[in-house]
Amino acid sequence: MTAIVQSIANAADTEQELTDGFHLVIDALKLNGLTTIYGVPGIPITDFGRMAQAEGIRVLSFRHEQAAGYAASIAGYLTKKPGVCLTVSAPGFLNGLTALAHATTNCFPMILISGSSEREIVDLQQGDYEEMDQLAIAKPLCKAAFRVLHAADIGIAVARAIRAAVSGRPGGVYLDLPAKLFGQVMEAEAGRKSLVKVIDAAPAQLPAPDSIKRALDVLKSAKKPLIILGKGAAYAQADEAVKALVEKSGIPFLPMSMAKGLLPDTHPLCAGAARSTVLKDSDVVMLIGARLNWLLSHGKGKSWGDAPKKFIQIDIEPKEMDSNVEIVAPVVGDIGSCVAALLDGMGSNWQAAPAEWTGSVAKKREENVAKMAPRLMNNNSPMDYHGALGVLRTIIKERPDAILVNEGANTLDLARGIIDMYQPRKRIDVGTWGIMGIGMGYCIAAAIETGKPVLAVEGDSAFGFSGMEVETICRYNLPVCIVVFNNDGIYRGTDVNAVGDDPAPTVFVKGSRYDKMMEAFGGVGINATSPDELKRAVNAAMDSGKPTLINAVIDPAAGSESGRIGNLNPQSVLKKKK
Ligand code: ADP
Ligand code: TZD
Ligand code: MG
């Protein structure tokens, strides 16, 4: 069906085919293969959503723009095409903006399209309905921001937005569409001609041959090399090349959270379970699509040990080099091209990493895995994290193509360590900011974009940030199973207020039944009090594909403050004195 507006009031007087802003935006998106929109309707984009749906775009209508935005951001990560979020003006836009900033920080391609109020009134600050200078506010929080005032510019604007989102280091792009634009009419043929099909939106960026040689020289000199795989490597979808590089070099690899599964966590060279050993003892570290930010202690300090280290870094963003420590061999380019060039340069008789090193890493890993094993098999009720996660670990092993969504503090840190991943881009979580609230948006986009079953492992606090979207999950009947680790609060459910009647700031209503929220919308709700019950419930949900929420009752005393990152909390001298 073509999106041409055939008739205007006096159609009889004219043979001219017409189109308008609504349809030009739809046609521009479709022309570029952007066929899914995550958003919340309202003035001025309600009809736009209806028309987009009528024109074959999948329009997922959410309960809150932030969740829709997170959905769009992870759709971008999973598909390498910008995920599209659609919001109304001012407050809707601001709700979506958090997700746009998140996409930019995490290097996910996303386009936030917001309707906006009348420019003339906004700029004179005359108090329009939902008045806000959205373009100015979005700018510092994204990679690029554009506003379109003329229907004839829609094609170019969408093309620029797509290119800006996916080329180089991916990120968020803001597209401001004032209400008046949608109704602007133009001649259909001119409209068609104004559209742009973006050719090669994310061109390959080849590394300089010198940089490859330099990196290989450094690698050759290593006695204890380590490869760190980040979510940029997973995003790049160069899975076979990355696997070949690891295996040909024989170098132990450490996957960052969302890179887990790029190679299976059970791979003989996986150093995930020997993390602190390899960070301390390695002498050459090759980063592939991972930044030396807080998640890697900035590449220095106690966790990196005293031994001198040399860093090689592969990244598409030249400015990332030397951001925290000296990079002796920067390799700038896209990961597919860089890894291919490294493999090529290694030739056919490359010496694999010293067996003494790989042997000691493997030994450490086996020890740590063995130490953990008995804890994962306990059947305590109420459950502790290890008992509950032991069950989920087996379920993912048996269903490796399921997508795992994970947020919380203890629920996040322990699940990351315990649940092995087997396939690329199957683990999606709080990302670079460690934010709560990505959960339900990620579940929805993962189900929509991949068609695979989704298992969400959610802290009870984390779940609360986007919990209302269970209605969305039920409405679209998505194969999502949510397990809420209900420990009555943030980190623990045991805090008490020593001086008054209000509850302590970190605790929730005791014995809450999150499963009932799912039942309210026609999904399946189950209360699970032991690992056995949890296992049965999750397997049933994954088999049926029905929207399911399992309230997993966790011992309120089991968690620790801030999970694994309690050290980042500032300390008060006064607190200690008391
Ligand atoms: P993690 O949190 O997993 O450590 P980061 O988000 O810190 O990963 O790092 C991802 C890095 O990957 C970013 O520096 C980004 O520029 C880079 N990146 C993303 N896509 C590509 C690509 N296709 N080629 C090369 N680098 C990429
Ligand atoms: N707000 C946002 C948007 N992101 C955050 N990370 C926080 C607040 C602070 N925060 C954390 O860092 S973890 C967390 C909060 C509120 C919740 C931890 O509780 P939980 O998990 O119930 O999700 P556990 O298992 O009880 O630790
Ligand atoms: Mg909790």
Image: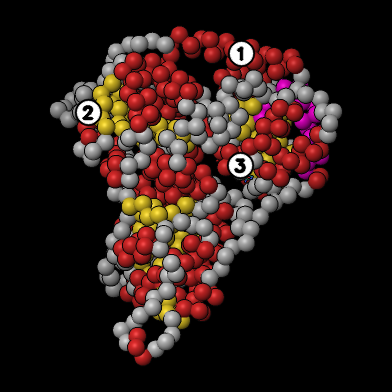
Closer to the observer: label 1 or label 2? 2
Q: Residue furthest left?
A: 501
User: Which region is colored magenta?
Assistant: 211-227
242 or 193: nearer the eye?
A: 193
57 or 578: nearer the eye?
A: 57
**Residue 94 visible to an observer of this rendering:** no
Comes first in the chain, label 1 or label 2? 1
217 or 382: nearer the eye?
A: 382
Residue under label 3, please give it. 237
What residue is shown at x 34% (from left), y 82% (from top)? 8
Q: Amino acid at mark 2?
A: Arg
Residue under label 2, please give it. 513
Residue under label 1, please give it. 364
What residue is shown at x 69% (from left), y 37% (from top)? 241
Comes first in the chain, label 1 or label 3? 3
Q: Classify residue 364 as left or right of residue 93.
A: right
Q: Look at the numbered disc 3 and say if its residue's Cβ is closer than 8 Å to ligand 1.
A: no
Distance from disc 1 to disc 2, alpha carbons, whole Å, reads: 41 Å
| Quadrant in the picture for the N terminus | bottom left
What residue is shown at x 64% (from left), y 27% (from top)? 253
Q: Classify residue 430 as left or right of residue 65.
A: right
Closer to the observer: label 3 or label 2? 3
Q: Residue furthest bottom?
A: 13
Residue 41: x percent and y percent? Answer: 31, 58
Q: Amino acid at mark 1?
A: Lys
Q: Residues within 10 Å of mark 1 (few under 14, many from 20)?
A: some
Q: Residues within 10 Å of mark 3 (few under 14, many from 20)?
A: some
Residue 520 shown in magenta: no
